[in-house]
Amino acid sequence: VSQTDMAYQAGGSPLAKEAMHQNINPKAPPMTAAEFERAKQIYFERCAGCHGVLRKGATGKALTPDITLGKGTDYLKVFIAYGSPAGMPNWQTSGEMSEQDVDLMARYIQQEPPTPPEFSLADIEKTRKIYVPVEQRPTRKMNHYNLDNLFSVTLRDSGEVALIDGDTKQIINIVKTGYAVHISRLSKSGRYLYVIGRDARLNLIDLWMAKPDNVAEIKVGLEARSVETSKFKGFEDKIAVAGTYWPPQFVIMDGDTLKPRKVVSTRGMTVDNEYHPEPRVASIVASHYRPEFVINAKETGKIMMVDYSDLNNLKTTTIDSAKFLHDGGFDSTGRYFLVAANASNKIAVVDTKEDKLAALVDVGKTPHPGRGANFTHPKYGPVWATSHLGAEDVTLIGTDPVKHKPYAWKAVEVLKGQGGGSLFIKTHPKSSNLWVDTPLNPDAKMSQSVAVFDIKNLNKPPQIVDVAACAQLGDGAKRVVQPEYNKAGTEVWFSVWSAKDKESAIVVVDDKTRQCKQVIKDKRLITPTGKFNVYNTQHDVY
Ligand code: DHE
């Protein structure tokens, strides 16, 4: 092919200095190919989480050209710059995007969305790296750390996790991982730590090494949020599963090598029997009653109970619940799994023993429990609690169908927290405190403090604890996010999450006195968000 032919095929003018992006829709505003590539990257990092990789909409609105072209560049620029009360962030006024980038993104979302690549099992296998083969790994614990009280802390923007000794508060290691690790989960024995990045990079960390570090790694797709490991008797530490947002599928792997064994697509019908091309995999938990993973497909509202005991004859029980499944956790017995169908304002309850939907509970606007919080209510018996993104409510749901039957799977009480914008709630079996964060509340006072209720006296309004003040950081926005208990249930750890170029910290609060006990600061603690105590995560204690 000659140079002229190439120029002709690319469709660009030979006089143009920069190659233009070729859009199939002539009405879309022009962009250079380089601009398109940059916008694609920004879209993936900032926008796809809410609007979807294919831009078909999810938590955020659909952004396909049939919608965006009618609005035009100027309108879209204002929306991106200033945000909306419905939850769209104010990208420009918050300082997170420049005016040029806002202009770029306004033009980008009027182009046809590029089709992202599919990931076959062979594609996934090609990305796998073994840093320490199984035969070279320790056969017993080679360090003197109290691993039960270790914390795995997401360092969001540096693409790392910090392993912090919960007893001494010292950083044991900073481990290189994917970008914006979403969650850490433990194998049944507690030896292996699995962390999954937003970029779908999954790292396997061996906590038995003298200095715990990566032993294997794999990239399971373009975007992911969830990972879990087999917990059923006979399958301890054997199998891992990761769910991806893109491609819409999950992959089952060997637990100790991450060798992929099976990829299953989630594409298909919603609970309303309409086709959905991109049902993203949200939370996953491992059943304690059967050799099964409980896999939640967000857009379809289908909960898949996937039997991992025979991968060649894969049995899956699919439970219809409600659309927009997101995060959730077990009740105190470990039998029932409660998951938020967030944009449906419902909590779905799955009985993992019977593999059936136990109930769909109506709650306030946009529930967001994390894994939720279990405690015994003075009147209603065992309850599980969620806070909300869209309301100040803290909703308590009865979870004991045997001794407290009239209250089971009902929203028995709604407490008033300090405001909306809550992401996580936590308590511990040894504590009588219920901690509720509000990191996404637009009022800085609320995003920097947390509410704490006395479980024994829930009529009393919550105490507000100014966690960010304890950290004594400089200026700039800081969000106090995700309470996590130590193993003993005597301390609650909070992240004070600042911008990437600003100092952040972890504040350890004494649970009994509700006073700041210790502040963990270190240059390496960049944008800490999620924290996962080994024992509590391993045993579903929350
Ligand atoms: Fe999360 C859990 C998805 C934004 C921190 N988040 C989850 C889970 C899902 C999810 C599906 C449940 C996983 C499981 O249990 O298997 N999160 C999403 C999104 O799609 C969303 C809304 C947008 C995005 O683009 O990612 C999103 N999440 C955030 C944040 O902005 C947070 C605060 C910081 C960050 O790193 O991005 C954040 N999400 C967390 C944390 C958990 C989590 C800390 C685990 C909580 C737990 O206690 O288990």
Image (cartoon, grey):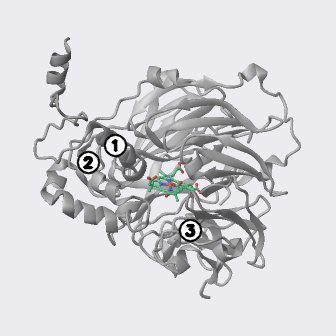
Give 446 or 282, whichever is nearer the viewer: 446
Query: Mark 2 is on which residue type?
Result: Tyr
- The residue at which mark 1 appears reads as 40
Q: Earlier in the sequence, mark 3 or mark 1?
A: 1
Q: Are marks 1 and 2 in contact (CB under 8 Å)?
A: yes
Q: In the image, residue 315 lies at what x, y percent?
A: 46, 31
Give 385 or 287, whichever is nearer the viewer: 385
Q: Secondary structure at mark 1?
A: helix
Q: Earlier in the sequence, mark 2 or mark 3?
A: 2
Q: Quadrant of the N terminus?
A: top left
- The residue at which mark 3 appears reads as 479
Crowd rating for badge 1 (residues with CA inside 10 Å; few <14, some 14–19, many 20+): some
Query: Mark 1 is on which residue type?
Result: Lys
In the picture provided, is 93 more to the left or to the right than 130? Answer: left
Q: Secondary structure at mark 2?
A: helix
Query: Mark 3 is on which residue type?
Result: Arg
* Callout 3: CB less than 8 Å from ligand 1: yes
